[in-house]
Image (cartoon, grey):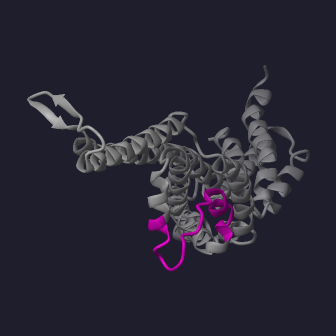
Amino acid sequence: MTEELAASIPDEAALDALAAAIGPARHLGLDVSEAERVLAERDGAHGPAGATATGRAARAALTKLANAAGLRSGGVRDLIPDPAQRRGIDGAIAEVALILDMDGFESQALALVRARARAKGLGPIRWIAALRDRRPARPPEPAQPASHLAAWKSRGVLTRAADQVRRAIDEALPEVPEGLRPVYSAAGEGDLEARIERSLERLIDAAAPQAESPPDYPYWALIGRVQWLNLALFAFAIVSLVGGILGFMPVWRIHLPFFRDVPGAPFVLILSPLIAFALTLGLKIHAERLGRSWSSRIENEVRRGVRVVLEAEAFAPLAPIESARAHLGEAWHRVL
């Protein structure tokens, strides 16, 4: 290998790196006229001195582009740091959560499961519940968790969520090179709210059908039958008590541990309401637990989906910009 050829290799590498950097730099909106001029002079360079001068000019032009893109010799880092992006995304998630009102969804879901459990498991006790529910001047609205989810846009707009993203960008702008500030500022404008809204619509449309099918439990119907049997036992005890008092029915007695000859009818009249109360309370607790598990599964799916949506859409316009910076940095580091 001749001395002239050996001396020209680093200069050729610098020129190749500069050629690779022009596309990303142009995508960033940087001035590439100097870089294009250096490349245009590439073929006119003769001899080692000319090649060295052209190589030096290529390195200088490439370094100028790298500095304008905010690149450092230690590596390529995002101009909006990850903690700032996290704060913006977390703030936007909090604002979206207020609009989706997942606490209201949980209340609707629990009410729906409780209503389903009462319809199957209360038996004759539902008459008492119906009398109680008639007392308010206005009857409660039927629980519709799916409709509550689907009506999320009627509870607010996404401006405050988008403002959280814009605030994260604005806070990072002082660290952004002056030539790139318009590009980064534009990332928070435009159709940010519309993009988030479209993605949230797809998410809610996928989750709402699950909220239309509340869970069921086969033993609720069995509890309802036991409630009817308990009512029959209570009625029999009333008849027995009245018959014993009037003398046309014998007074029957039962033997309990530590208690003997306990009158059966009064004992059953006390025991039967306690059984009804225990069955009703157990039904309520079980329905509450089952409903909470069901609603939590849907809630967690929606919350995870909201985070995915905002992580994908919040800083999406910056992805091609950071990709261009990465390619420019890769070209620059080849000649450092």
Examine the image and state in which quarter residue 250 appears: top left
Q: Nearer the viewer, residue 20 or 290?
A: 290
Q: Is residue 188 above or below residue 58?
A: below
| Magenta part of the chain | 131-153
Please report the residue visible at 47 percent of the width from the left and 66 percent of the height from the top: 131
Give the percent coordinates (x, y) of residue 196.
69, 62
Q: Is residue 147 left or right of residue 258?
A: right
Residue at the bottom extreme of this rendering: 137
Looking at the image, can residue 158 be seen? yes
Q: Is residue 321 visible in the rendered structure shown here?
A: no
Question: Of residues 135 and 107, which is closer to you in this image?
Answer: 135
The quadrant of the rendering that contains the N terminus is: top right
What is the residue that sits farthest to the top in this orientation? Answer: 1
* 278 is within the stretch colored magenta: no
Q: Is residue 275 left or right of residue 22?
A: left
Was residue 134 drawn as part of the magenta stretch in this picture?
A: yes
- In the picture, measured across the screen, residue 328 lies left or right of residue 247, that is right
Tell me: 83 left or right of 56: left
- Compared with 178, 85 (above or below) is above
> Residue 102: horizontal and vertical position, in percent?
53, 59
Query: Most extreme residue toward the left, as rendered?
Result: 258
